[in-house]
Amino acid sequence: MRVSYQITEFMTMLCQVRLEWAERIPGVVHLDGSARPQIVSKKLQFLAWSVLKQFMELTGVPVLVNTSFNLHEEPMSEDAVRWLEGSKTVRGGLRYL
């Protein structure tokens, strides 16, 4: 199935990851073999697109992990320091980041 930009703009859809890619990008693949992709548009998100393009040229991998570090019912974090200060995950035992 080909996934459209409109469906994945806000990472609201799960897709199954092909085995050959799951082996290359295990950090973005969920236990059930799915991932929540976000397609980045050169026209709409030029900076993010440029970072991805450069990363792909350096590594051959056109994928980065995108996380906001927010948990269900917690506000979006402005930066990692504020997330570490207030996150339930840290208080709950996160050991590594």
Image (cartoon, rainbow, N blue to C red):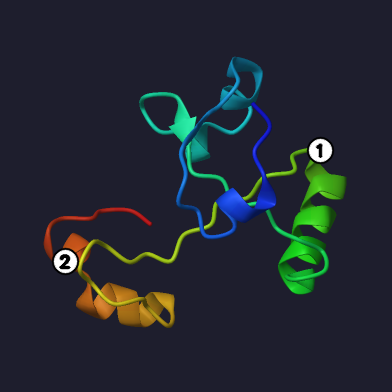
Q: Which label is found at residue 74?
A: none
Q: Residue at x 37, y 78 (%)?
A: 77
Q: Identify the image quadrant of the C terminus.
A: bottom left
Q: Residue at x 37, y 24 (%)?
A: 32
Q: Which residue is mark 1?
A: 60
Q: Residues within 10 Å of mark 2 (few under 14, many from 20)?
A: some
Q: Residues within 10 Å of mark 1 (few under 14, many from 20)?
A: few
> Where in the figure is residue 19, as x and y percent of width and height?
58, 16
Q: Which residue is mark 2?
A: 88
> Where in the figure is residue 54, as x and y percent of width and height?
83, 57
* Element type at mark 2: helix
Q: Identify the image quadrant of the N terminus.
A: top right
> Where in the figure is residue 21, as x and y percent of width and height?
64, 25
Amino acid type at mark 1: Gly
> Where in the figure is residue 15, as x and y percent of width and height?
51, 33
Outermost residue on the right side: it is 57
Q: Quadrant of residue 89?
A: bottom left
Position of 7 compared to 77: left or right?
Answer: right
Q: Quadrant of residue 41?
A: bottom right
Position of 17 compared to 80: left or right?
Answer: right
Position of 93 compared to 71: left or right?
Answer: left
Q: Residue at x 29, y 73 (%)?
A: 84
Decide: is 88 above or below 60.
Answer: below
Which of marks 2 and 1 precedes in the sequence? 1
Q: Residue at x 26, y 62 (%)?
A: 71
Q: Whole-Å distance between the Cαs marked 1 and 2?
A: 36 Å
